[in-house]
Amino acid sequence: SQDCIESIKKDSPNCRIIAGGISGDCPSLAGQPFGQNDVAALIGPEGGFTENEDAFLKSRSVQFVRLADTILRTETAAIAFAAILAAQRNQTK
């Protein structure tokens, strides 16, 4: 929601906010250089974000990324986000 994004930006201004995208044009999460930066991951509904939600998130500089070549269920997407980000963080230490 809008309040959630604004809260993240206020409380952690250097945090990168990413969201799961279902478009093949989205870059892969595994290829993103996050290093030790804080990352907030937004997981949308199984059908993807609505056009209005997409537009809002893009207007707030949220980066859409692809988790896999298939569309994941919401609960699976959360685990995939966490696992990929943890693996990347461990590689940069």
Image: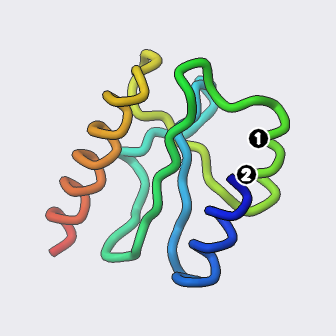
Left or right: where 83 falls relative to 31: left
Residue at 65 percent across and 56 percent down: it is 62
Mark 2–mark 1 distance (CA, rounded to whole Å) = 6 Å
- In the figure, is residue 92 to the left or right of 15? left
Q: Which quadrant holds the C terminus?
A: bottom left
Of the numbered discs in the image, which one, if any, rests on residue 57?
2
Given residues 51 and 90, the one toward you in this image is 51
Residue 81 screen position, x and y as percent: 34, 44
Res 28 → quadrant: top left
9 or 64, which is in the foreground? 9
* Dot 2 crowding, Cα within 10 Å, few <14, some 14–19, many 20+: many
Judged from the image, the secondary structure of the residue bearing numbered disc 2 is: helix
Q: Secondary structure at mark 1?
A: helix
Q: Nearer the viewer, residue 14 or 73?
A: 73
- Which dot marks residue 81? none
Residue occupying the point 31% across, 76% down: 36
Relative height, residue 27 to residue 38 (above, below)? above
Asked whether the residues under the numbered discs 2 and 1 touch, taking CB atoms below 8 Å apart as contact, a structural biologist would say yes
Q: Position of residue 69 (x, y in %)?
A: 42, 19
- Mark 1: give few (<14), some (14-19) or many (20+) Cα within 10 Å: some
Check disc 1 and report the residue beneath it. 53
Q: Quadrant of residue 26?
A: top right
Who's the residue at 63% across and 76% down the image? 9
Q: Relative to 49, does residue 84 appear above or below in the rendering?
A: below
* Type of amino acid at the residue the image marks with label 2: Leu
